[in-house]
Image (spheres, grey):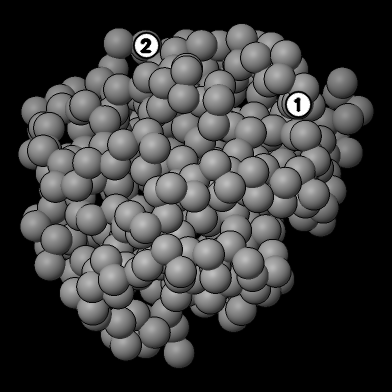
Amino acid sequence: MSFLDAYKKLDWKEVSGSIAGKTESDVKQALSRPSGKLSLSDFAALVSTSAAPYLEEMAALSHRLTVERFGFTQQMYAPLYLSNVCSNVCTYCGFSATNRIPRKVLNDLEISQELRALKALGMNHVLFVTGEANKRVGVPYLQRAFELARRDFASISMEVQPLEQHEYEALIPSGLSAVLVYQETYNRETYAEHHLSGMKKNFDYRLETPDRLGRAGIKKIGLGALYGLDDWRVDSFYVAAHLKYMEHTYWKSRYSLSFPRIRPHEGDVTPKSVMTDRDLVQLICACRLLSPEVELSLSTRESEHFRDHVHKLGITSMSAGSKTNPGGYDVDPQTLEQFEISDERSPSEVASMLKRNGYEVVWKDWDATYDGFASVTPAQALEA
């Protein structure tokens, strides 16, 4: 049993029609539900066009629920790109195998150099990112990277190629606590249009990755779609369905959602569906009302102005100072980015903005001892 079984019971066109058919009465009914008690039908109403007049009410409820659960806090993190080598051909990604760009895989010394640069920015939570190339950046490579990070970083996350359950289990002792894996789009036909070759072409294998993560006992699992590949309202419904399934099935894990919109990159693709800023606010609020416990993340893909105002409405974590190219912090800042960022402020500048808005900045996810190991080994402690 996996989410694939639940997915097969859904029909894209039927879901689209259901969302389009939602009325203001459906929206009011959804907003009257107790927190955490919304159905997927209620969620469909909250992402429908009929919910647009109720955005202020949704935002107020979302803010209240977020503060009740998370307080006035924002976690800060930064991605560290280890490699831009990729075996997939994807129409929307700067790392696509057919793009004629210089390829780079950071070695141990370069990883350490990048980690020092991140630490100097104040970061205590690192998200390792790679292109999808299992031979070049497989489990042994990731284990070495995690070992290098464990001394100075309290928590380690990754966004890499989907792995087998036993491979995730092998990475946990090295410090892995969270994994992000996005389906990109839940429309099987659209997915095939944008994933032309490579392992990522296998829709079902990718869809079942969160199940493998749940069975492996990963502490936090990140879900999401790439908004612009297809109708954002329908993709959002599928993300919500996936989240509810995961929360029910693998209840020991925590969950996060991200909201990436297509950004300019090498090998550009024209978005099929345009998600406006107002649309994104509506989606963020709908996700918070659906799940008061889920963590919601907003990356530097979004503008300064947007992030400064929207983080209060349900967001619990924000990246800052992000570089989306391997070596981008210190080793080789000129390598090609996976996509262009919008908010180019430093972590300290973003932290200052949050503090002005009355928020406490949280620089780490959880202490390493929570995962059963210390970030500094006894031998390292003696050396210090």
Q: Which dot marks residue 333?
A: 2
Above or below: residue 356 compared with residue 27? above
Percent x, y for residue 346? Answer: 55, 11
Expressed as whole percent of the image width and height from the top left, the position of residue 290 reads 57, 63
Q: Is residue 213 above or below residue 64?
A: below
- Foreground mark, 1 or 2, reads 1
Nearest to the observer: residue 34 or residue 238? 34
Horizontal arrangement in the rendering, residue 54 relative to residue 384 (left or right): left
Horizontal relation, residue 74 to residue 105: left or right? right
For the residue carrying disc 2, how many other residues have a C-alpha within 10 Å: few (<14), some (14-19), or many (20+)? some
Regarding residue 245, the answer to whether it shows in the image is yes
**What amino acid type should be assigned to the residue bearing mark 1?**
Tyr
- Quadrant of the image for the N terminus? bottom left
* Front-most of residues 7 and 1: 7
Q: Quadrant of the C terminus?
A: top right
Residue 280 picture location, percent across and down: 40, 42
Q: Label 1 crowding class (10 Å Cα cut-off): few <14, some 14-19, many 20+?
A: some
Q: Secondary structure at mark 2?
A: loop
Residue in the image at 68% along x and 59% along y: 293
**Sequence-earlier tag: 1 or 2:** 2
For mark 1, what is the residue?
359
